[in-house]
Image: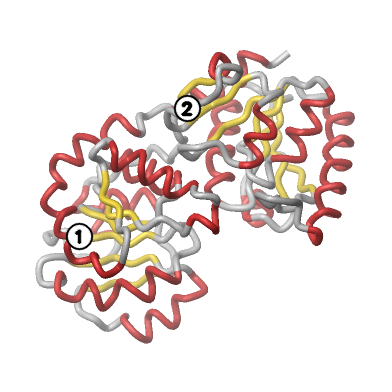
Amino acid sequence: MILVTGGGTGGHFYPGLAAAQALRAMGHEVAYVGAEGGLEARLLPQGDLPYHLIPAGKLSRDLLRPAEGGKVVRGLMAARGLLRRLRPRAVLSTVGYAGFPLAFAAEWAGVPVVIHEQNARLGLAARWLAARAQRIGLSVPVALNPQLSPRSRVVGYPVREVRHPKAEAKQALGLDPARPLLLVMGGSQGSLELNRELPQRLEPFLGEYQVLHQCGVRWEAQMQAEHGKTPGYAVRGFVDGPLAWSAADLAITRAGAGTLAEAAFHGVPGLLVPLPRDLDGGAQWANAGFYAERGASVILDGWERFQAKLEQLITQAPAMKNALAPLSPAGAARRLAELVLEVAR
């Protein structure tokens, strides 16, 4: 059996789920280990993949948060119990706080561990796990120290590899198939900042563009009341990712690794609004910088520059589509699965 672990949020859960499904398709027995209370606790029961949920405490970049310390200890104890009972051939962790307990316990138990870092820099859990991991899978090239580099490989970020014809996707979303679409995507849960800032700022562009704004389920009622009747401005709490990205011509998004990988897979140039560095340790700024340096996106570094930056995106979009093409190649889930099989006992 191979255990896959990680979650808490979609950015850590979906790559692990994709790799788990790839491993099953290749004929291997797989189970998923997620965090109690994480996104996976709601989604795993809806599928047919065997799963286990254990406590997982959130990690601080400075010190362990006192309130989370008990969860970390209980998670490590639960992980040790699972390892004794299931005796896995290998563990794949998509890191983050939910992917830490099982991978850490496995490393100390001598079970081969593969980690997958989604962002353009190693996060806290990945840095702790990398020293003893057998392999390190990367979504994009990351500068690593000489001890880690020989064990690392760029495999990409697993996305749902489904594309729809653009006009059909727009029609399926209830949009005008003939008008260019600007997609606003604040991640799977939406973004309060984008919800507050964008509707009025985008009004001058509604003559040429229509907008599909995924605002997050918790803010949908408020956004519908305030902007749902604006012609050409469609508000949804949640949208199907492949359908929305297939329909989009341009995007305004956060800079999460999954969002950028989906944009690249579908060839959609974006204006990126990264999270403040103090909220994620600078991961989204690292992601945005990686894409911008390759001419594949524009970074918004202040709302006072919004109109100029959006106009820059519109002007440079054709060249950006070419730059996006190599950044999220198909087959990432299988490449990650194959990396795990290299070390499975």
Q: Nearer the viewer, mark 2 or mark 1?
A: 2
Residue 250: quarter of image: bottom left
- The colour scheme applied to this rendered structure is secondary structure
Q: Residue at x 29, y 72 (%)?
A: 234
Residue 20: quarter of image: top right
| Residue 176: x %, y % from top left | 17, 65
Q: Secondary structure at mark 2?
A: loop
170 or 250, which lies in front?
250
199 or 224, which lies in front?
199
Q: Which residue is mark 2?
A: 143
- Circle 2: residue type: Ala
Earlier sequence position, callout 2 versus callout 1: 2
Q: Residue at x 26, y 70 (%)?
A: 304
Q: Which residue is mark 1?
A: 310
Image side of residue 176 versus residue 173, left or right:
left
- Circle 1: residue type: Leu
Which quadrant is home to the C terminus?
A: top right
Image side of residue 92 versus residue 214, left or right:
right
| Residue 198: x %, y % from top left | 30, 71
Q: Residue furthest bottom?
A: 225
